Amino acid sequence: MGLKSTLHNLKEKYKGTKMAPAFNAIHTFLYLPNETTHNGTHIKVADDLKRTMNTVIMAMVPCLIFGMFNAGYQHYAAFGTPVEFLSWDAFYIGLIKILPLVIVSYGVGLAIEFLFAVIKKHEVEEGYLVTGMLVPLIVPVDTPLWMLAVAVAFGVVIGKEVFGGTGMNILNPALTIRAFLFFAYPTWMSGDKVWVHGAVERANEIAAGAELDAISGETILGGLAQGKDLGYSVADMFYGFIPGSVGETSTLLILLGGLFLIFTKIGSWRIMLSSLMGALVMGLIFNGVVDAGWITESSKFYGLMSTIWWHHLLIGGFAFGTVFMATDPVTASQTNKGKWIYGFLIGFISILIRVFNPAYPEGVMLAILLMNVFAPTIDHYVVQGNVKRRMKRLKVKTA
Amino acid sequence: MSNDIKIKKGLDIKLKGAAEKATENAIISNFCTVRPEDFHSIIPKLIVKESAKVKAGEAIFYNKSNDAMLFASPVSGEVLEIVRGPKRRVDAIKIQADKEQSFKDFGTFNLESADSNAVKAHLLASGCWPFIKQRPYDVIANPDKAPKAIFISGYASAPLVADLDYVLQGKEAQLQAAVTALGKMTDGSVHVCVGKNSNSPLAGLNGITLHTVSGPHPSGNVGTQINKIDPVNKGEVVWTVNAQDLVIIGELLLTGKFNAERIVALVGSSVKKPRYFKTKIGSEVATMVYDNGVDKEGNDRIISGNVLSGKQVKPDGALDYYSNTITVIPEGDDYELFGWNKPVFNKISTSRAMTFSWLTPNKKYELDTNTNGEHRAFVMTGNYEEVFPLDIYPLQILKACMYSDLDEMEALGMYEVAPEDFALTEFVCVSKQPHQEIIRKGLDVMIKEIG
């Protein structure tokens, strides 16, 4: 007797009431439920959706912790007082800036999930556990909390709940949230200041008449789009000592997370690999265009087009998007063949948008959202292949 | 058409409690229960009344939509009770078995001279017809429609099930008679699949097309074999018969007796002495399970059939009409602290998400009936395909069944499948969806709408 039986009695008490889904969500968080099989298979695998989602979160935790260090590191570097990367000073800035993002993301998102579960009388599904973790990792560190809260509310309600909740949505909810942020608050979000903590504030002070040096908070992509030099070494880009959204900078840790997801069979290696190939192909094409001399250095596309093809994998959010967001099983293609096509086009279009969109030099978000929309179409044609084979078999018989 | 079928996609679920190859005679059950629900989609019309006397093989009810199709009593005795459910539906017919069994004599059947219609009439009249099932729809075969082929699986790959090589030993004569009779009813072949490197008595029969199968479950499912040998197209029908039921059909043809005797494997981790028993269709499971180490007070699940597709029965329940396995496993109706995120070593998983069954591929597990999670919407993709060898998209066909789109169900291959083909996808389903139930309901909609 103890917690287990107390909770069991409470569960029986709440059964059938409005609060049952909310209570069960917390109860099943503590205890795997006592549910047994009835019809069909009498035994089941050990995995459930909670375990699956939890595995994805585990893969993202290193990125989150790295992001906290990096936020402070970039802040001090930009303000001219560099500190060691693995220092308490760096981590402290990250902690006080990023932890609130995590709390707001989970708080607002889960509150809406619970609300919908209670209203629609279904169980609280686990989809938001991953979304809630993704969101703080893909926004700039200086995102105001109120904006984040509004965006999360929009993304969860319009991106997911209106379609029927977890498993039914067409667009990746985390990307819907990010897209909302970027299109609803473009002056704030797409500038070159928001990526380093303090840069926006400093710019405002200067505008107000303070005599201070301006701080650049630019990402590499932002710089390249304006025709500037790379400015960072390949090693810096690979390890992630660059400005950018909270969790997207360290290609190394994302790679490790991706390998972990492939090893645990939770993430689709087909999508990750084909997306990688798509990006490399597009990068090579652009390099070819530059080599052939079809565009000159005066072109506004020159900076990004001439970026060495495989560098595209290291900069911006490409790696993070490919590993953690393109692979979302609900919004990706669902057939294995479809996954190859879907992934390849994500990589291909990411780099295309990256190069050709001057206002918004990161393509992976739009590429994934676009392919989310086309994923059912890809699946349809893949499945039609199977259907046609069956029809042909019938025709051969009757002929 | 391949004579050597290799299945790559699938999963062998290794469980504790496989039957030792020794056969005992079960205590003769005093009661025999026939449940019309075993014969899916058949509406029974009773022939006998309570307290009537019947012989083994005598008809107790017939099919409402085809009154030539009779269903026989497996034993001789007195009809004790007709259990009815809502709307006077017949739930079960309980027969008290005589101490001395007497059989209705159908006479020896002259196989040489018989034609298709004679065989059909004989099987229908003797209650052997229900052993013949058909695809599409996985129901008892319609005698008016000739099948393009007949399929018999002589290889059992489901977890813990009775080894067909063992239970069919010495039954060659009956098997041959049954196969010859079946062969007369089709213009196509009688396809028989046996395990590779097995010494199945089926392999030596005449008048069959023999195939060997190898690979993980569901290689032994007849649905898998049909899909690889000669898939069902729209408008076509194939028949399937369980290998063990051939023995009953064969004995009827040779001796004129409907002898519902069957060798049944009693298996599962809750059974102390798992082994084979000679018993009859409809016997109470209690006559076997409690004498063999299943704890009477224990919290166990008794299943007539295998752990993947069998039916849950109560201790006073009966062996169903088609099963040759009784499985007893522990119930899992308990909570587990942080069961969703802690590392798992004692359960099977196809992922490696802090589950470690991939480290010990040969370990035998003791699984209980816990669902290991709650029912959710479909989220994960690609994991069904790994255990589903049919040339069909499992997730898509399941969804088509859920929204009852008949055109789509037909196009995706609904005529080829039976619920048991989706047992493994149901087992591995992260969202704990009831795949077999979804497919069964989908097939029922098709019967109703298309027929």
Image (cartoon, coloured by chain):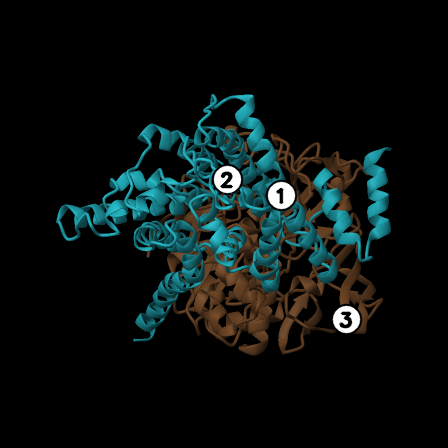
- On the rendered structure, is A274 left or right of A11? left
- Most distant residue in the left direction: A292
Q: Nearer the viewer, residue B114 or B346?
A: B346
Q: Amino acid at mark 2?
A: Ala
Q: Quadrant of residue B103?
A: bottom right
Q: Percent from the top left, x then y, of residue B41?
A: 64, 70
Few, some or many C-alpha atoms within 10 Å of disc 3 (few <14, some 14-19, many ≥20)? few
Q: Which callout, 2 or 3, points to the residue nearer the camera?
A: 2
Q: Colour of chain B?
A: brown
- On the rendered structure, is A71 left or right of A165? left
Q: Amino acid at mark 1?
A: Lys
Q: Quadrant of the C terminus of chain B?
A: bottom right
Q: Secondary structure at mark 3?
A: loop
Q: CA distance from mark 3 to mark 1?
A: 42 Å
Q: Quadrant of residue A26?
A: top right
Q: Secondary structure at mark 1?
A: helix
Q: Percent from the top left, x then y, of residue A162?
A: 61, 64
Same chain, marks 3 and 1? no
Q: Nearer the viewer, residue A111 or B76?
A: A111
Q: Percent from the top left, x then y, of residue A336?
A: 40, 52
Q: Secondary structure at mark 2?
A: loop
Earlier in the chain: of badge 2 and badge 1, it is 1
Residue A50 badge: 1
For residue B211, above or below residue A264? below
Same chain, marks 2 and 3? no
Please say whether residue A34 is visible from this viewpoint: no
Residue B89 badge: 3
Are the residues flagged by discs 3 and 1 in contact, CB closer than 8 Å? no
Q: Colour of chain A?
A: cyan
Q: Which residue is mark 2?
A: A210
